[in-house]
Image (spheres, helix red, strand yellow):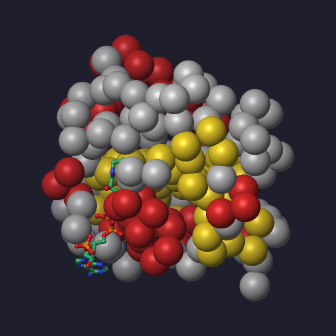
């Protein structure tokens, strides 16, 4: 668990599943992904995140606002699958419900998750990547102290060649 000024990054709980499914079914939240997620897919991803945190002591944390305990989405770190061109590496990622946008929450949580990665977890490098069109996510990367690595940009292996989301831009942050 990680606590920031306004947020708690914590293990997932059953009460997250409903608001998590709602944000995954929101076409605006999922605009830069191939499709919105069904309830089944949403539940499976939450279960995967929960198991990963249990196993590794870090992961894609559920983000809760401290003042009212409202679930906002996830922010955290995860080791990349071997199939990712940047592997082996740990990536930072985030996805918040629309009502949580525009308040600096993603940057606050990402900065704290990366500090935990470099501190407690002893990481030397964290990467992040997103589709060319996802300017909001790129802004979080920049605001949370990451550096653009255009030389590492890649076409996502899970998407067919020529897909509108295929090209991914890469950022990185090294332990300072
Ligand atoms: C990516 C995503 C998390 C970014 O959310 P965001 O709200 O734009 O980013 P932040 O939480 O860092 O908030 C920054 C904004 O809050 C504003 N803000 C307001 N109060 C603030 C405060 N107290 N502190 C900091 N910023 C504040 C900033 O000015 C900035 O506004 P701007 O976008 O108009 O410049 C969000 O768009 C999202 O969940 N998208 C869908 C999922 C997704 O694409 N994930 C990434 C996949 S790679």
Q: Is residue 165 above or below residue 106?
A: above
Q: From where the camera sits, is residue 3 visible?
A: no
Residue 45 percent location from the top left of the image? 48, 28
Q: Residue at x 32, y 51 (%)?
A: 96
Query: Left or right: 134 with respect to 85?
Result: left
**Of residues 6 and 176, which is closer to you in this image?**
176
Quarter the C terminus occupies: bottom right
Residue 98 percent location from the top left of the image? 20, 51
Q: From where the camera sits, is residue 37 visible?
A: yes
Q: Residue at x 41, y 19 (%)?
A: 41
Query: Left or right: 65 with respect to 9?
Result: left
Quarter of the view holding residue 33: top left
Residue 32 percent location from the top left of the image? 37, 41
Q: Is residue 42 above or below residue 128?
A: above
Residue 60 percent location from the top left of the image? 54, 47
Q: Residue at x 39, y 51 (%)?
A: 133
């Amino acid at each position: 668990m990680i606590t920031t000024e306004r947020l708690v990054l914590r293990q997932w709980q059953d009460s997250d599943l409903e608001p998590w499914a709602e944000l995954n079914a929101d076409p605006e939240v999922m605009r830069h992904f191939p499709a919105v997620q069904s309830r089944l897919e949403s539940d499976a991803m939450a279960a995967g995140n929960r198991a990963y945190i249990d196993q590794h002591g870090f992961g894609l944390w559920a983000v809760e606002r401290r003042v009212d305990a409202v679930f906002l989405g996830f922010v955290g770190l995860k080791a990349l699958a071997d199939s990712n061109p940047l592997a082996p590496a740990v990536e930072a990622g985030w996805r918040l419900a629309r009502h949580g946008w525009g308040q600096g929450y993603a940057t606050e949580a990402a900065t704290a998750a990366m500090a935990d990665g470099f501190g407690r977890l002893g990481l030397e490098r964290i990467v992040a990547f997103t589709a060319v069109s996802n300017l909001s996510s790129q802004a979080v990367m920049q605001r949370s102290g990451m550096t653009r690595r255009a030389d590492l940009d890649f076409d996502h292996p899970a998407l067919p060649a020529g897909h509108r989301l295929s090209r991914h831009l890469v950022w990185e942050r090294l332990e300072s």
